[in-house]
Amino acid sequence: MSATPTTNYAEIFGALRPEAALVLGALVVLGVDLAFGRRRSEAARLRTSALIGLAAIAVAVCSALGAGHAGAVVDGVIVLDSLGVATRVGVLGLSGLTLLLAPGTSRLRHPAEFVAILLFATTGFTLMAVAQHLLLAFLALELASLSLYVLAGFDKTRPESAEAALKYFLLGAISAAFLLFGFSLLYGLTGSLALPDIARHLATQPTSTLLLVALVMILVTFGFKAAAAPFHLWAPDVYQGAPTAAAALIASASKLAGFVLFVRLLWSGLLSASGDASTLAGAPGWMPVAAGMAGLSMFLGNFVALAQTNVRRLLAYSAIAHAGAMLLGVIAAGAAGPGPVFYYAATYGLATVGAFGVIAVVDQAGGCHQLSDLAGLYRRSPLLAGCLLVFILSLAGIPPLAGFFGKFAVFAAALRIGGVAGPLGWLTLAAIFLSAIGLYYYLLILKQALVIAPAADRGRISTPANAALVLVVTAVLLVVLGLFPSVILGLF
Protein backbone atom coordinates (compact mmCIF):
# COMPACT_ATOMS: atom_id res chain seq x y z
CA MET A 1 0.00 0.00 0.00
CA SER A 2 1.60 3.27 -1.14
CA ALA A 3 1.99 6.18 1.21
CA THR A 4 -0.17 9.21 0.69
CA PRO A 5 1.92 12.19 -0.46
CA THR A 6 2.02 15.09 1.97
CA THR A 7 2.36 18.77 1.21
CA ASN A 8 5.54 20.28 2.61
CA TYR A 9 4.38 23.79 3.45
CA ALA A 10 7.75 24.71 4.92
CA GLU A 11 9.40 23.98 1.57
CA ILE A 12 6.76 26.00 -0.28
CA PHE A 13 7.17 28.99 2.04
CA GLY A 14 10.96 28.76 1.83
CA ALA A 15 10.84 28.83 -1.96
CA LEU A 16 8.31 31.68 -2.05
CA ARG A 17 9.70 33.97 0.65
CA PRO A 18 10.33 36.85 -1.80
CA GLU A 19 6.76 36.63 -3.06
CA ALA A 20 5.43 36.43 0.50
CA ALA A 21 7.35 39.60 1.40
CA LEU A 22 5.91 41.45 -1.60
CA VAL A 23 2.32 40.39 -0.95
CA LEU A 24 2.62 41.21 2.75
CA GLY A 25 4.11 44.58 1.83
CA ALA A 26 1.19 45.32 -0.49
CA LEU A 27 -1.31 44.48 2.26
CA VAL A 28 0.57 46.66 4.76
CA VAL A 29 0.57 49.55 2.28
CA LEU A 30 -3.20 49.30 1.88
CA GLY A 31 -3.80 48.86 5.62
CA VAL A 32 -1.62 51.78 6.70
CA ASP A 33 -3.16 54.07 4.11
CA LEU A 34 -6.67 53.05 5.11
CA ALA A 35 -5.96 53.58 8.82
CA PHE A 36 -3.80 56.70 8.79
CA GLY A 37 -3.56 58.18 5.32
CA ARG A 38 -7.02 59.36 4.37
CA ARG A 39 -6.61 62.76 6.05
CA ARG A 40 -3.13 63.40 4.63
CA SER A 41 -2.20 64.89 1.28
CA GLU A 42 -1.75 62.63 -1.73
CA ALA A 43 1.97 63.47 -1.87
CA ALA A 44 2.46 62.43 1.77
CA ARG A 45 0.46 59.24 1.25
CA LEU A 46 2.52 58.37 -1.79
CA ARG A 47 5.80 58.91 0.09
CA THR A 48 4.65 56.70 2.96
CA SER A 49 3.38 53.98 0.64
CA ALA A 50 6.56 54.08 -1.42
CA LEU A 51 8.75 53.71 1.68
CA ILE A 52 6.78 50.65 2.80
CA GLY A 53 6.96 49.23 -0.71
CA LEU A 54 10.72 49.76 -0.86
CA ALA A 55 11.09 48.00 2.49
CA ALA A 56 9.11 45.04 1.14
CA ILE A 57 11.30 44.92 -1.97
CA ALA A 58 14.46 45.05 0.18
CA VAL A 59 13.21 42.10 2.26
CA ALA A 60 12.34 40.23 -0.95
CA VAL A 61 15.85 40.81 -2.34
CA CYS A 62 17.43 39.42 0.84
CA SER A 63 15.07 36.43 0.70
CA ALA A 64 15.89 35.77 -2.94
CA LEU A 65 19.63 35.86 -2.26
CA GLY A 66 19.20 33.67 0.80
CA ALA A 67 17.24 31.01 -1.08
CA GLY A 68 20.45 29.70 -2.64
CA HIS A 69 20.60 27.36 -5.64
CA ALA A 70 18.53 24.44 -4.45
CA GLY A 71 17.48 23.35 -7.94
CA ALA A 72 13.96 22.05 -8.54
CA VAL A 73 11.78 22.34 -5.43
CA VAL A 74 8.09 21.95 -4.57
CA ASP A 75 7.81 18.78 -6.71
CA GLY A 76 9.58 20.47 -9.61
CA VAL A 77 7.10 23.35 -9.91
CA ILE A 78 9.77 25.92 -8.99
CA VAL A 79 13.45 25.90 -9.96
CA LEU A 80 15.97 27.84 -7.88
CA ASP A 81 19.04 28.13 -10.09
CA SER A 82 21.42 30.94 -10.96
CA LEU A 83 19.08 32.26 -13.66
CA GLY A 84 16.11 32.29 -11.30
CA VAL A 85 17.98 34.02 -8.47
CA ALA A 86 19.54 36.59 -10.80
CA THR A 87 16.20 37.34 -12.47
CA ARG A 88 14.43 37.70 -9.15
CA VAL A 89 17.03 40.17 -7.94
CA GLY A 90 16.99 41.96 -11.29
CA VAL A 91 13.24 42.50 -11.46
CA LEU A 92 13.13 43.48 -7.79
CA GLY A 93 15.86 46.05 -8.38
CA LEU A 94 14.12 47.48 -11.46
CA SER A 95 10.81 47.61 -9.60
CA GLY A 96 12.47 49.38 -6.69
CA LEU A 97 13.97 52.01 -9.01
CA THR A 98 10.57 52.45 -10.64
CA LEU A 99 8.91 52.87 -7.26
CA LEU A 100 11.42 55.55 -6.32
CA LEU A 101 10.32 57.53 -9.38
CA ALA A 102 6.70 57.74 -8.21
CA PRO A 103 6.87 60.33 -5.36
CA GLY A 104 7.02 63.86 -6.67
CA THR A 105 6.78 62.91 -10.34
CA SER A 106 3.25 61.53 -10.67
CA ARG A 107 -0.36 62.69 -10.56
CA LEU A 108 -2.01 59.79 -8.77
CA ARG A 109 -5.36 60.00 -7.01
CA HIS A 110 -4.93 56.67 -5.24
CA PRO A 111 -1.22 56.43 -4.36
CA ALA A 112 -1.44 53.47 -1.96
CA GLU A 113 -3.35 51.41 -4.48
CA PHE A 114 -0.73 52.27 -7.13
CA VAL A 115 2.11 51.03 -4.93
CA ALA A 116 0.22 47.89 -3.91
CA ILE A 117 -0.57 46.95 -7.50
CA LEU A 118 3.06 47.59 -8.46
CA LEU A 119 4.09 45.12 -5.75
CA PHE A 120 1.58 42.57 -7.06
CA ALA A 121 3.02 43.00 -10.56
CA THR A 122 6.51 42.45 -9.15
CA THR A 123 5.25 39.29 -7.46
CA GLY A 124 4.19 38.02 -10.86
CA PHE A 125 7.62 38.87 -12.28
CA THR A 126 9.47 36.97 -9.56
CA LEU A 127 7.25 33.92 -10.04
CA MET A 128 7.87 34.04 -13.79
CA ALA A 129 11.60 33.93 -13.04
CA VAL A 130 11.43 30.55 -11.26
CA ALA A 131 8.42 28.85 -12.87
CA GLN A 132 9.06 25.36 -14.26
CA HIS A 133 5.42 24.37 -14.57
CA LEU A 134 2.92 25.55 -17.16
CA LEU A 135 0.18 26.30 -14.64
CA LEU A 136 2.46 28.41 -12.44
CA ALA A 137 3.88 30.14 -15.52
CA PHE A 138 0.40 31.07 -16.73
CA LEU A 139 -0.75 32.28 -13.30
CA ALA A 140 2.42 34.34 -12.81
CA LEU A 141 2.16 35.85 -16.28
CA GLU A 142 -1.47 36.81 -15.79
CA LEU A 143 -0.89 38.21 -12.29
CA ALA A 144 1.77 40.48 -13.74
CA SER A 145 -0.30 41.34 -16.83
CA LEU A 146 -3.51 42.19 -14.98
CA SER A 147 -1.55 44.44 -12.64
CA LEU A 148 0.10 46.21 -15.56
CA TYR A 149 -3.25 46.79 -17.28
CA VAL A 150 -4.47 48.62 -14.16
CA LEU A 151 -1.24 50.60 -13.77
CA ALA A 152 -1.38 51.71 -17.41
CA GLY A 153 -4.77 53.38 -16.83
CA PHE A 154 -4.02 54.83 -13.41
CA ASP A 155 -3.63 58.47 -14.42
CA LYS A 156 -7.24 59.68 -14.36
CA THR A 157 -6.25 63.19 -15.45
CA ARG A 158 -5.27 62.07 -18.98
CA PRO A 159 -7.62 60.39 -21.49
CA GLU A 160 -4.56 58.83 -23.13
CA SER A 161 -4.04 56.72 -20.01
CA ALA A 162 -7.51 55.18 -20.22
CA GLU A 163 -7.05 54.53 -23.94
CA ALA A 164 -3.68 52.87 -23.29
CA ALA A 165 -5.14 50.62 -20.59
CA LEU A 166 -8.06 49.57 -22.80
CA LYS A 167 -5.86 48.67 -25.77
CA TYR A 168 -3.38 46.90 -23.53
CA PHE A 169 -6.12 44.90 -21.82
CA LEU A 170 -7.96 43.85 -24.99
CA LEU A 171 -4.84 42.70 -26.80
CA GLY A 172 -3.49 41.12 -23.62
CA ALA A 173 -6.69 39.16 -23.08
CA ILE A 174 -6.47 37.80 -26.62
CA SER A 175 -2.83 36.81 -26.12
CA ALA A 176 -3.72 35.08 -22.82
CA ALA A 177 -6.33 33.01 -24.64
CA PHE A 178 -3.72 32.00 -27.23
CA LEU A 179 -1.27 31.00 -24.49
CA LEU A 180 -3.85 28.98 -22.57
CA PHE A 181 -4.90 27.17 -25.75
CA GLY A 182 -1.27 26.43 -26.58
CA PHE A 183 -0.59 25.11 -23.09
CA SER A 184 -3.70 22.92 -23.25
CA LEU A 185 -2.45 21.38 -26.50
CA LEU A 186 0.94 20.71 -24.92
CA TYR A 187 -0.77 19.01 -21.99
CA GLY A 188 -2.88 16.92 -24.34
CA LEU A 189 0.19 15.84 -26.30
CA THR A 190 2.43 15.04 -23.34
CA GLY A 191 0.11 14.44 -20.38
CA SER A 192 2.18 16.71 -18.17
CA LEU A 193 2.47 20.37 -17.17
CA ALA A 194 6.06 20.18 -15.91
CA LEU A 195 8.69 21.38 -18.39
CA PRO A 196 11.16 18.49 -17.85
CA ASP A 197 8.39 15.93 -18.40
CA ILE A 198 7.17 17.77 -21.49
CA ALA A 199 10.71 17.75 -22.89
CA ARG A 200 11.07 14.00 -22.30
CA HIS A 201 7.75 13.20 -23.97
CA LEU A 202 8.40 15.41 -27.00
CA ALA A 203 11.88 13.93 -27.47
CA THR A 204 10.31 10.52 -28.15
CA GLN A 205 7.63 11.77 -30.54
CA PRO A 206 7.80 13.12 -34.10
CA THR A 207 6.80 16.73 -34.60
CA SER A 208 3.04 16.68 -35.08
CA THR A 209 0.61 19.22 -36.48
CA LEU A 210 -0.89 19.80 -33.04
CA LEU A 211 2.56 20.57 -31.64
CA LEU A 212 3.16 23.12 -34.39
CA VAL A 213 -0.20 24.74 -33.60
CA ALA A 214 0.77 24.89 -29.92
CA LEU A 215 4.09 26.51 -30.84
CA VAL A 216 2.31 29.16 -32.89
CA MET A 217 -0.06 29.90 -30.01
CA ILE A 218 2.80 30.26 -27.54
CA LEU A 219 4.88 32.45 -29.86
CA VAL A 220 1.93 34.78 -30.42
CA THR A 221 1.81 35.42 -26.68
CA PHE A 222 5.58 35.72 -26.53
CA GLY A 223 5.50 38.33 -29.28
CA PHE A 224 2.83 40.32 -27.46
CA LYS A 225 4.57 40.26 -24.07
CA ALA A 226 7.91 41.21 -25.62
CA ALA A 227 6.38 43.90 -27.90
CA ALA A 228 7.87 42.10 -30.89
CA ALA A 229 6.48 42.66 -34.39
CA PRO A 230 3.88 41.93 -35.66
CA PHE A 231 2.33 41.85 -32.16
CA HIS A 232 3.66 45.25 -31.10
CA LEU A 233 0.70 47.52 -31.80
CA TRP A 234 -0.08 48.13 -28.13
CA ALA A 235 3.37 49.39 -27.20
CA PRO A 236 3.43 52.97 -28.61
CA ASP A 237 0.03 53.85 -27.11
CA VAL A 238 0.85 52.31 -23.72
CA TYR A 239 4.26 53.96 -23.51
CA GLN A 240 2.65 57.29 -24.38
CA GLY A 241 -0.44 57.09 -22.19
CA ALA A 242 0.62 55.20 -19.06
CA PRO A 243 1.91 57.03 -15.96
CA THR A 244 5.67 57.38 -16.16
CA ALA A 245 6.40 54.89 -13.39
CA ALA A 246 4.05 52.34 -14.96
CA ALA A 247 5.59 52.79 -18.40
CA ALA A 248 9.06 52.33 -16.91
CA LEU A 249 7.96 49.10 -15.21
CA ILE A 250 6.39 47.76 -18.41
CA ALA A 251 9.52 48.56 -20.38
CA SER A 252 12.04 47.14 -17.91
CA ALA A 253 11.11 44.53 -15.28
CA SER A 254 8.26 43.12 -17.36
CA LYS A 255 10.54 42.56 -20.33
CA LEU A 256 13.30 40.95 -18.27
CA ALA A 257 10.92 38.51 -16.57
CA GLY A 258 9.13 37.72 -19.83
CA PHE A 259 12.29 36.85 -21.75
CA VAL A 260 13.59 34.64 -18.94
CA LEU A 261 10.26 32.80 -18.73
CA PHE A 262 10.22 32.09 -22.44
CA VAL A 263 13.88 31.05 -22.49
CA ARG A 264 12.93 28.42 -19.92
CA LEU A 265 9.80 27.41 -21.80
CA LEU A 266 11.38 27.18 -25.24
CA TRP A 267 14.67 25.57 -24.27
CA SER A 268 13.74 23.50 -21.19
CA GLY A 269 10.35 22.30 -22.42
CA LEU A 270 10.33 22.62 -26.21
CA LEU A 271 13.94 21.86 -27.08
CA SER A 272 13.07 18.98 -29.40
CA ALA A 273 10.73 21.29 -31.35
CA SER A 274 13.27 24.07 -31.81
CA GLY A 275 14.22 23.40 -35.41
CA ASP A 276 17.67 23.99 -36.92
CA ALA A 277 19.64 26.92 -35.48
CA SER A 278 22.34 26.97 -38.12
CA THR A 279 20.17 27.01 -41.23
CA LEU A 280 16.77 28.12 -39.86
CA ALA A 281 15.31 25.60 -42.29
CA GLY A 282 14.75 21.89 -42.57
CA ALA A 283 13.05 20.54 -39.47
CA PRO A 284 10.03 22.63 -38.47
CA GLY A 285 10.14 24.32 -35.08
CA TRP A 286 9.87 27.57 -33.16
CA MET A 287 13.35 28.86 -34.00
CA PRO A 288 12.67 29.98 -37.60
CA VAL A 289 9.51 31.76 -36.43
CA ALA A 290 11.43 33.51 -33.65
CA ALA A 291 14.10 34.53 -36.16
CA GLY A 292 11.45 36.00 -38.46
CA MET A 293 9.92 37.95 -35.57
CA ALA A 294 13.38 39.21 -34.62
CA GLY A 295 14.16 40.49 -38.11
CA LEU A 296 10.75 42.14 -38.54
CA SER A 297 10.94 43.76 -35.10
CA MET A 298 14.37 45.25 -35.70
CA PHE A 299 13.46 46.51 -39.16
CA LEU A 300 10.10 48.00 -38.21
CA GLY A 301 11.18 49.37 -34.84
CA ASN A 302 14.25 51.19 -36.11
CA PHE A 303 12.73 52.64 -39.27
CA VAL A 304 9.42 53.74 -37.73
CA ALA A 305 11.29 55.34 -34.81
CA LEU A 306 13.00 57.65 -37.32
CA ALA A 307 9.67 59.36 -38.01
CA GLN A 308 8.65 59.89 -34.37
CA THR A 309 8.48 63.31 -32.74
CA ASN A 310 6.87 62.17 -29.48
CA VAL A 311 9.65 61.09 -27.13
CA ARG A 312 7.63 58.29 -25.50
CA ARG A 313 6.53 56.80 -28.82
CA LEU A 314 10.13 56.97 -29.98
CA LEU A 315 11.17 54.93 -26.93
CA ALA A 316 8.35 52.49 -27.69
CA TYR A 317 9.57 51.80 -31.22
CA SER A 318 13.09 51.61 -29.84
CA ALA A 319 11.80 48.93 -27.45
CA ILE A 320 10.36 46.99 -30.40
CA ALA A 321 13.78 47.06 -32.09
CA HIS A 322 15.50 45.95 -28.89
CA ALA A 323 12.98 43.12 -28.52
CA GLY A 324 14.10 41.83 -31.90
CA ALA A 325 17.74 41.87 -30.81
CA MET A 326 16.84 40.05 -27.59
CA LEU A 327 15.08 37.39 -29.65
CA LEU A 328 18.46 36.63 -31.19
CA GLY A 329 19.66 36.03 -27.65
CA VAL A 330 16.77 33.63 -27.06
CA ILE A 331 17.72 31.70 -30.21
CA ALA A 332 21.37 31.58 -29.12
CA ALA A 333 20.55 30.58 -25.51
CA GLY A 334 20.58 26.89 -26.35
CA ALA A 335 24.32 26.97 -27.11
CA ALA A 336 25.55 30.11 -25.33
CA GLY A 337 23.33 29.86 -22.27
CA PRO A 338 20.94 32.49 -20.92
CA GLY A 339 23.71 34.89 -19.89
CA PRO A 340 23.77 37.12 -23.02
CA VAL A 341 20.01 37.63 -23.24
CA PHE A 342 19.76 38.18 -19.48
CA TYR A 343 22.56 40.76 -19.55
CA TYR A 344 20.97 42.52 -22.51
CA ALA A 345 17.49 42.62 -20.96
CA ALA A 346 18.75 43.71 -17.53
CA THR A 347 20.94 46.55 -18.81
CA TYR A 348 18.29 47.64 -21.29
CA GLY A 349 15.86 47.80 -18.38
CA LEU A 350 18.24 50.02 -16.41
CA ALA A 351 18.69 52.43 -19.32
CA THR A 352 14.94 52.57 -19.96
CA VAL A 353 14.10 53.26 -16.31
CA GLY A 354 16.64 56.06 -16.35
CA ALA A 355 15.27 57.56 -19.57
CA PHE A 356 11.74 57.52 -18.20
CA GLY A 357 13.04 59.06 -14.98
CA VAL A 358 14.39 62.04 -16.92
CA ILE A 359 11.09 62.32 -18.80
CA ALA A 360 9.19 62.25 -15.49
CA VAL A 361 11.19 65.11 -13.99
CA VAL A 362 10.98 67.26 -17.13
CA ASP A 363 7.27 66.50 -17.43
CA GLN A 364 6.70 67.63 -13.85
CA ALA A 365 8.54 70.86 -14.60
CA GLY A 366 6.31 71.86 -17.51
CA GLY A 367 5.64 68.94 -19.83
CA CYS A 368 7.70 66.45 -21.82
CA HIS A 369 5.83 65.09 -24.80
CA GLN A 370 7.66 66.14 -27.95
CA LEU A 371 11.37 65.92 -28.58
CA SER A 372 11.45 69.71 -28.61
CA ASP A 373 10.42 69.73 -24.94
CA LEU A 374 13.93 68.47 -24.14
CA ALA A 375 15.55 71.48 -25.84
CA GLY A 376 18.22 73.12 -23.72
CA LEU A 377 18.17 70.49 -21.02
CA TYR A 378 21.90 71.00 -20.47
CA ARG A 379 21.17 74.55 -19.22
CA ARG A 380 17.99 73.78 -17.34
CA SER A 381 19.50 70.85 -15.44
CA PRO A 382 23.06 69.62 -16.06
CA LEU A 383 22.34 66.55 -13.88
CA LEU A 384 19.41 65.47 -16.05
CA ALA A 385 21.33 66.15 -19.25
CA GLY A 386 24.38 64.18 -18.10
CA CYS A 387 22.31 61.20 -16.97
CA LEU A 388 20.24 61.27 -20.18
CA LEU A 389 23.48 61.17 -22.16
CA VAL A 390 24.48 57.93 -20.41
CA PHE A 391 21.04 56.33 -20.85
CA ILE A 392 20.66 57.17 -24.53
CA LEU A 393 24.21 56.15 -25.44
CA SER A 394 23.68 52.85 -23.64
CA LEU A 395 20.45 52.24 -25.56
CA ALA A 396 22.31 53.09 -28.77
CA GLY A 397 25.03 50.55 -27.91
CA ILE A 398 28.01 52.90 -27.57
CA PRO A 399 31.05 51.55 -25.67
CA PRO A 400 32.05 51.37 -22.89
CA LEU A 401 28.48 51.45 -21.59
CA ALA A 402 26.54 48.30 -20.72
CA GLY A 403 24.26 48.55 -23.75
CA PHE A 404 27.21 47.96 -26.07
CA PHE A 405 28.32 44.78 -24.32
CA GLY A 406 24.73 43.53 -24.19
CA LYS A 407 24.46 43.75 -27.95
CA PHE A 408 27.96 42.41 -28.43
CA ALA A 409 27.26 39.34 -26.26
CA VAL A 410 24.00 38.54 -28.06
CA PHE A 411 25.33 39.12 -31.58
CA ALA A 412 28.53 37.15 -30.89
CA ALA A 413 26.53 34.23 -29.51
CA ALA A 414 24.28 34.22 -32.59
CA LEU A 415 27.26 34.33 -34.96
CA ARG A 416 28.96 31.44 -33.18
CA ILE A 417 25.91 29.27 -33.84
CA GLY A 418 25.05 30.10 -37.43
CA GLY A 419 28.34 31.45 -38.77
CA VAL A 420 28.60 34.54 -40.91
CA ALA A 421 27.48 32.77 -44.09
CA GLY A 422 24.34 31.12 -42.68
CA PRO A 423 20.85 32.64 -42.42
CA LEU A 424 21.30 33.36 -38.71
CA GLY A 425 24.61 35.03 -39.49
CA TRP A 426 22.97 37.23 -42.13
CA LEU A 427 20.23 38.10 -39.67
CA THR A 428 22.85 39.09 -37.10
CA LEU A 429 24.69 41.25 -39.62
CA ALA A 430 21.38 42.91 -40.48
CA ALA A 431 20.85 43.53 -36.76
CA ILE A 432 24.22 45.27 -36.55
CA PHE A 433 23.36 47.43 -39.57
CA LEU A 434 19.94 48.32 -38.16
CA SER A 435 21.54 49.22 -34.82
CA ALA A 436 23.69 51.72 -36.71
CA ILE A 437 20.53 53.21 -38.24
CA GLY A 438 18.99 53.40 -34.78
CA LEU A 439 21.88 55.58 -33.68
CA TYR A 440 20.36 58.42 -35.72
CA TYR A 441 17.15 58.79 -33.73
CA TYR A 442 19.02 58.45 -30.44
CA LEU A 443 21.24 61.33 -31.55
CA LEU A 444 18.10 63.36 -32.25
CA ILE A 445 17.26 63.11 -28.55
CA LEU A 446 20.75 64.14 -27.53
CA LYS A 447 20.75 66.98 -30.04
CA GLN A 448 17.69 68.49 -28.39
CA ALA A 449 19.03 67.99 -24.88
CA LEU A 450 22.65 69.00 -25.40
CA VAL A 451 22.83 71.27 -28.45
CA ILE A 452 19.57 73.16 -29.03
CA ALA A 453 19.18 76.27 -26.89
CA PRO A 454 16.21 76.35 -24.50
CA ALA A 455 13.20 78.58 -25.03
CA ALA A 456 13.46 81.95 -23.36
CA ASP A 457 10.54 81.34 -21.00
CA ARG A 458 11.87 78.06 -19.57
CA GLY A 459 13.61 78.17 -16.23
CA ARG A 460 15.84 75.72 -14.44
CA ILE A 461 14.54 72.33 -13.38
CA SER A 462 14.71 71.23 -9.76
CA THR A 463 15.18 67.46 -9.55
CA PRO A 464 13.49 65.76 -6.55
CA ALA A 465 15.88 63.84 -4.32
CA ASN A 466 14.24 60.48 -5.03
CA ALA A 467 14.46 60.95 -8.79
CA ALA A 468 18.05 62.19 -8.56
CA LEU A 469 18.96 59.04 -6.60
CA VAL A 470 17.40 56.81 -9.27
CA LEU A 471 19.13 58.61 -12.13
CA VAL A 472 22.58 58.67 -10.53
CA VAL A 473 22.43 55.03 -9.37
CA THR A 474 21.18 53.86 -12.77
CA ALA A 475 23.82 55.81 -14.68
CA VAL A 476 26.60 54.50 -12.44
CA LEU A 477 25.37 50.91 -12.86
CA LEU A 478 25.38 51.24 -16.64
CA VAL A 479 28.97 52.48 -16.57
CA VAL A 480 30.18 49.86 -14.07
CA LEU A 481 28.42 46.96 -15.80
CA GLY A 482 29.81 48.18 -19.11
CA LEU A 483 33.36 48.25 -17.76
CA PHE A 484 32.93 44.93 -15.93
CA PRO A 485 30.35 42.86 -17.85
CA SER A 486 31.62 39.67 -16.23
CA VAL A 487 29.87 40.76 -13.02
CA ILE A 488 26.65 39.49 -14.63
CA LEU A 489 27.87 37.23 -17.40
CA GLY A 490 30.07 35.34 -14.92
CA LEU A 491 26.96 34.22 -13.03
CA PHE A 492 26.06 31.86 -15.87
Image (tube, grey):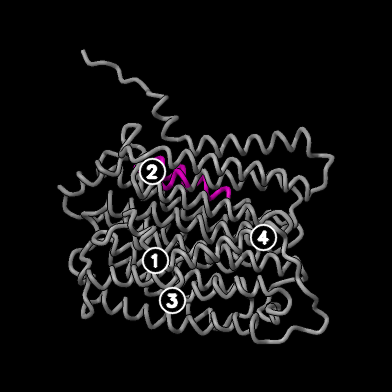
Return the residue nearer the eye: 461 or 359: 461
Q: Amino acid at mark 4?
A: Ala
Task: Say what secondary structure mark 4 lies in.
Answer: helix
Q: Position of residue 472 (x, y in %)?
A: 60, 63
**Residue 471 or residue 137, whichever sits in front:** 471
- Magenta stretch in the rendered image: 126-147
What kind of secondary structure does the magenta stretch mostly adopt? helix
* Badge 2 or badge 4: first in the primary sequence: 2
Find out whether the residues at labels 2 and 4 contact each other: C-beta distance under 8 Å: no
Pointer 4 residue: 467
The mark lying in front, picked from 3 and 1, is 3
Q: Amino acid at mark 3?
A: Pro
Element at badge 2?
A: loop
Disc assigned to residue 399: 3
Query: Which image quarter holds the C terminus?
Result: bottom left
Q: Residue at x 62, y 52 (%)?
A: 99
Which of the two discs, 4 and 1, sits closer to the camera? 4
Query: Which numbered marker is on residue 131?
Result: 2
> In the image as oriented, which residue stretches furthest toward the bottom?
452
- Residue depicted at 74% across the width and 76% down the height: 380
